[in-house]
Amino acid sequence: MPTVSTTTQRKLAAQFIGVTNATKENAQAFLKNANYNLDAAVNLGAGMTAYPSSSHMASSDTLDSDSRVMVLQLFKSCFQKRPTRASGKSLKQDDRVTEAESGDSSQHSLPSLSRSRDAGNVSTRQGTVAPASLAPIFSTKDTKSRKTKSTSKSTSKSVLGTLVRYFSSAETESNDDEALSAMFDKLRSGDDETNSIGLDSIEKYTKELGISVEDYTFFVLCEILRVESYGQITREGFIEGWKSAPEYRDSIGKALPLAERHRKYLRQCIDKITKKPRDEDYYKAVYRRAFFAGKDPEQRAVDTPVAMAFWETLFDPAIQPWQTANTDWLDAWKRYLEETWYHNGTWKRSVNKDTWNQTLEFARQTMKDGTLSFWSEDQAWPGVIDNFVAWCRENGIAPKSATDVMDVDGN
């Protein structure tokens, strides 16, 4: 097609912005992908929003005049509802478009839509993020196949329905983010950083939720809120964690106040590890999350006293007792660590991530086989667990292996 002059491009961008309330960057992107045909660019924008993961785009042939106006109104509202600039900040001068720039652009103009333009939106609009990529307008073949008026109207309704669902979902998600962020700010104390809440605020919050930082229910909360370090809940983890709750996806849950939604979801997650049949995978996720909740951000391991306190909590008889009919394995494990890692009032070693994770796997095996016959030196257990098995056999906690018995008899 002929090259479109810079002046014409600016005029087209101004008209696109007037119709859709999009940003300058969005206008340029849509127009470029529509070969600077204003009518096609607007429809491309509507189609991209209606079908964000599909190559099927809305074209001017798919919408009757009434539906077209509705589509553009919805498209325009999308840009208004998803601001990226902080409120109260003015737009840069070169990102504004004056009325003088939005003049006629000959064959590229869109006179049939001029009535939907609100002149006030040009200078007061809020920006939005442009799509990461723009698919081409759908093929001429697809467009020509829509020959009848009834087919056109049917497609119009489909596009409109998808747009309504998409915008409603986007607006709801945005509202959820804002509400959760506001709640997060209320939980923060004066000593907390902008995007995290510390120990005092966390303890206060757990009381509001009806749980305690001193038992396993706290680690369930840590898993929900994706805690990554000791004594810290981040804004991102708080928002994304609570949004994963079913109460943010069904109409009944959405009718509940935020705090009630959170308590309800937290109780459901606690029930996963306390009621039978227990969700073993979820318990494992909670157990592994505790490792992160026990270390500082710069640490790669958990201090042994902290790990031992956490093991007592996570192997609570109410959820996961580490014991068999004849052996209290948790007690044996703690005694072994004290004998081998604690010297002159100091812990000589800490618990790394692999040891932490493998301790749970070892505990599950011991509860199935208290003789420790499942263990083999050829397996990839951490060295501390290999040594623990030997210690148990030496102290009569577990029977000696068949090999050991044979060696003793041979002597």
Image (cartoon, helix red, strand yellow):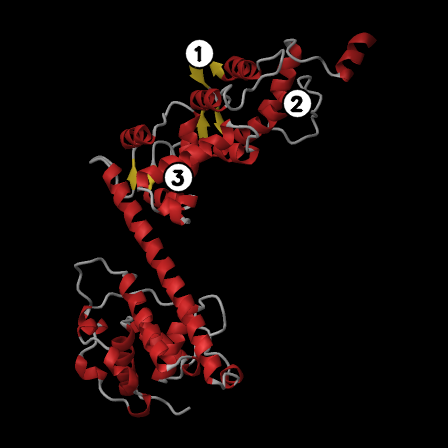
Marks 1 and 2 in Cβ contact (< 8 Å)? no
Give the quadrant of residue 198.
top left
Compared to residue 384, the image places residue 251 above or below, namely below
Give the residue type that dot 2 points to.
Lys
Give the residue type that dot 1 points to.
Asn
Q: Which residue is mark 2?
A: 368
Asked whether 267 or 21 is in front, the reply is 267
Asked whether 129 or 5 is in front, the reply is 129
Residue furthest to the right: 410
Give me the residue at 30% from left, 53% from top: 175
Visible in this render: residue 338?
yes
How far apart are the two marked residues, 1 and 2, measured between alpha carbons? 36 Å
Q: Which residue is mark 1?
A: 344
Give the residue type that dot 3 points to.
Leu
Q: Which residue is mark 3?
A: 225
Marks 3 and 1 in Cβ contact (< 8 Å)? no
How far apart are the two marked residues, 3 and 2, measured between alpha carbons? 32 Å
Marks 3 and 1: which is nearer the front? 3
Q: Position of residue 367 (x, y in %)?
A: 62, 21
- Helix, strand or loop status at disc 3: loop
Give me the residue at 36% from left, 60% from top: 168
Sort mark 2 into few (<14), some (14-19) or many (20+) by Cα contacts within 10 Å. Answer: few
Q: In terms of sequence position, does the residue under pointer 3 or pointer 2 come before the other?
A: 3
Looking at the rendered image, the quarter that the N terminus falls into is: bottom left
Give me the residue at 21% from left, 76% from top: 97
Compared to residue 19, the image places residue 226 above or below, namely above
Asked whether 94 or 278 is in front, the reply is 278
How far apart are the two marked residues, 3 and 1, measured between alpha carbons? 39 Å
